[in-house]
Amino acid sequence: MNIYEYLQEDSCMNNIKAKDKEGVLRLFADRAAADGRFTGISSETIYQKLAEREEQGSTGFGNGIAIPHARVEGAKDFYLGIATSGRGIYFDAVDKKRVHLFICILGPEEQVSEHLQVLAAVSRALAHTGLARELTSAKSDRAIYESFVRHTSPEKEEAEKAEQEEQQLLTVVVYFEDYLHQILEYFIESGIEGATIVDAVGMGQYISNIPLFAEFIGFLRENRNAGKVIMAMVPKSRSQEIIQGIEGITGSFEHREGAMVMLQDVALVRGSMKMF
């Protein structure tokens, strides 16, 4: 997903003067209302949508970062806005600290799945690169824009949509909870819109209860015998790319225990596991 295409330089705001959450949301709403993607939609309408989302729970997820977002009826396309605050602004963040970096995501109300993809892509870009540090230290609107584009521009074009391609069944077994959450986030960003997660236990769960073997493998009981099995249909042309992306989370499957991946050709696929 080319999320950098949703950002314009005039949507970037360095060291804003807003003093509170309402001020930040209104600033984003004003900028968005002036954008062609929101023709006929008032700043107040956009602000109310952002405020309603904040009432469900703060989008300040800690470490000085907030990602306010909302779906807006009548929006023609997705919109990104970025703002920084040197002093920081209290935003009801989960860690109770001031927020210095805000990335606002607005999009068409009906495009729920696409909204999740944009949100996941922004979240991963902030978590796994030096983007957040660069944005907060930028000295101008232009510097903010260039930094974001540099970190989020793809090295190659996206593959065709999965529905138009031959599919394979990807099965991932993980024994660490952190892997599960990161892999699902990666799936959403990559356009994999549905997966099935099954609780699983390894054979050690049972063998360790046999007195003869308990001494040798009982120590595995806590963190290696209970896991999750993730199953998803993926485009055959992208399967190796997706596996490499998963290995970026788990480490190489050739050299690390606690995670395994399997890829199978499927003779027949009918139905969908899409979330929406």
Image (cartoon, rainbow, N blue to C red):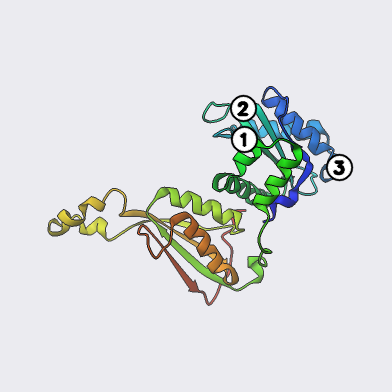
**Mark number displayed over residue 91:** 2
Q: Alpha carbon of mark 3 to alpha carbon of mark 2: how far?
A: 29 Å
> Which numbered disc, 1 or 3, marks the residue that appears first in the sequence?
3
In depth, the one of 74 and 155 nearer the eye is 155
Three-letter amino acid code of the residue under disc 1:
Ala
Residue at figure coordinates x 61%, y 44% from the top left:
131
Q: Is residue 269 above or below residue 50?
A: below
Q: Is residue 168 above or below residue 30?
A: below
Q: Residues within 10 Å of mark 2 (few under 14, many from 20)?
A: many
The mark lying in front, picked from 3 and 2, is: 2
Please give the residue where the numbered disc 3 appears in the rendered image: 39
**Does the CB distance between marks 1 and 2 fall below 8 Å?**
yes
Residue 31 drawn at (x, y percent): 80, 36
User: On the image, which quarter does residue 66 sit in?
Assistant: top right
Element at label 1? strand
Residue at figure coordinates x 68%, y 33% from the top left:
84
Residue at figure coordinates x 67%, y 23% from the top left:
20
Q: Alpha carbon of mark 1 to alpha carbon of mark 2: how far?
A: 8 Å
The residue lying furthest to the front in this view is: 139
Please give the residue where the numbered disc 1 appears in the rendered image: 66
The residue lying furthest to the top in this view is: 19
Q: Mark yes or no: residue 224 visible.
A: yes
